[in-house]
Amino acid sequence: MSTEDNKALIRRIVDGLNQKNVAVIDELCTPDFVSHDPANPQVRSREDYKQWCTGMFAAFPDLYFSLEDMLTEEDKVAYRYTLRATHSGSWRGAPPTGKSITVTGTSITRITDGKSAELWSNTDALGLLQQLGVVPAPGQAS
């Protein structure tokens, strides 16, 4: 696949997730897909990733990913994104706060035979927790 095809694959995955369509994961990720995310070490397989997305959509029903930048080289696409959402459902034991969040992150996806085979992600998990009030932000009383 060309680098443009690889970028298009990432856009299709993000578009599907923005539509809350977890079936896009089965369609566009390999059966042996592996996720690497230090904030979510329990999410490893394609099935884990679908369950994680479903939980995020329940807690943040208006969740939306904006792709900010994409770079490609050979079989990898690196991209920077912004996630925006409202905390409307329980998430990791935190009751809904109604707070709006904006979180940034970067990911690298390895593509095999036109599908996502491996994902490395780093999202500002601390910033998310601070925005929800779970962890105090610098200068806030604890």
Image: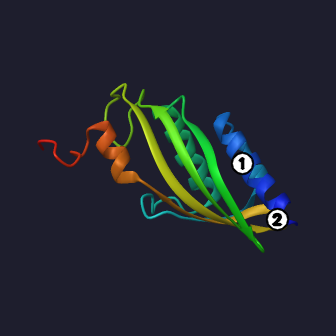
User: Circle 1 — which element?
Assistant: helix
Q: Position of residue 117 (x, y in %)?
A: 71, 66
Query: Is 22 rendered above or below residue 45?
Result: above
Quadrant hosting residue 7: bottom right
What coloring was used for the rendering? Answer: rainbow
Dot 2 and dot 1 residues touching (CB under 8 Å)? no
Q: Is residue 73 left or right of residue 66?
A: right
User: Circle 2 — which element?
Assistant: helix
Give the mark, 2 or 1, whose residue is nearer the N terminus.
Answer: 2
Quadrant hosting residue 15: top right
Q: Is residue 16 left or right of residue 129?
A: right
Screen quadrant of the C terminus: top left
Q: Nearer the viewer, residue 140 or 24?
A: 140
Give the amino acid type for the residue marked by disc 1 in the picture: Ile
Residue position marked by numbered label 2 in the rendering: 3
Residue position marked by numbered label 1 in the rendering: 13
Query: Is 141 rendered above or below residue 114?
Result: above
Give the amino acid type for the residue marked by disc 2 in the picture: Thr
Q: Residue at x 62, y 49 (%)?
A: 68
Q: Residue at x 54, y 45 (%)?
A: 82
From this viewpoint, which residue is outermost toward the right?
A: 1
Screen quadrant of the N terminus: bottom right
Q: Nearer the viewer, residue 39 or 50?
A: 39
Query: Is 139 rendered above or below residue 97?
Result: below
